[in-house]
Amino acid sequence: MNVPVRYAGFWMRFWAYLLDLIVISSIGRILIKPVLRVLDLSLSDFNMFAPISIASAVIFYAYFILMTKYFNQTLGKMVFGLKVKDLHQEKLSWGTVLFREWIGRFISATIILGYIIVAFLPKKQGIHDLFTDTTVIHAER
């Protein structure tokens, strides 16, 4: 029996992403800030190259890359029952995950339209999905 694919729309992905941001922020507060305090490095610099900024970026991208590669979903996607799928039914390769979650996400965030188009495309893809032939679906229960 072939179950029809249910693509995850803009709002489901949005709420999952917000939950991921809470998780990432918590990781940063639990891991990064104490280490920077011990090393006596500034926590208040709003410079792109400040230690807090670099560490936060590393945590952000590592979280999305590793969770997507090993689980096909982040904690936010798990809570909302979503998964990243390759449109060719292949396992997500490191190249696909790195491009989707690092370069593609950066492009989509830079051009806000990159996320908004999810609401209008038939397979509910953002720009980062279009580049990598992926989409987000409702996981089978």
Image: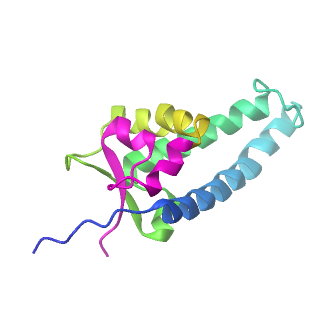
Say above or below: 136 vs 93. Answer: below
Q: Is residue 3 left or right of residue 85?
A: left
Name the image quarter holding the N terminus. bottom left
Q: Toward the viewer: 22 or 117?
A: 117
Q: Is residue 26 left or right of residue 116?
A: right
**Position in image of residue 97 (x %, y %):** 39, 39
Say above or below: 100 vs 77. Answer: above
* Quadrant of the rendered image containing residue 82: bottom left
Q: Toward the viewer: 19 or 9?
A: 9
- Residue furthest to the top in view is 49
**Position in image of residue 137 (x %, y %):** 35, 61
**Residue numbers of the magenta segment:** 113-141
**Position in image of residue 33 (x %, y %):** 80, 43
Residue occupying image coordinates x 50% and y 69%:
79
Residue occupying image coordinates x 81% and y 36%:
36
Q: Is residue 17 left or right of residue 128?
A: right
- Residue furthest to the left in view is 1
Say above or below: 61 vs 20. Answer: above
Residue occupying image coordinates x 62% and y 59%:
18
Say above or below: 10 vs 39. Answer: below
Q: Is residue 140 magenta?
A: yes
Name the image quarter holding the C terminus. bottom left
**Position in image of residue 119 (x %, y %):** 46, 57
Residue occupying image coordinates x 13% and y 70%:
2
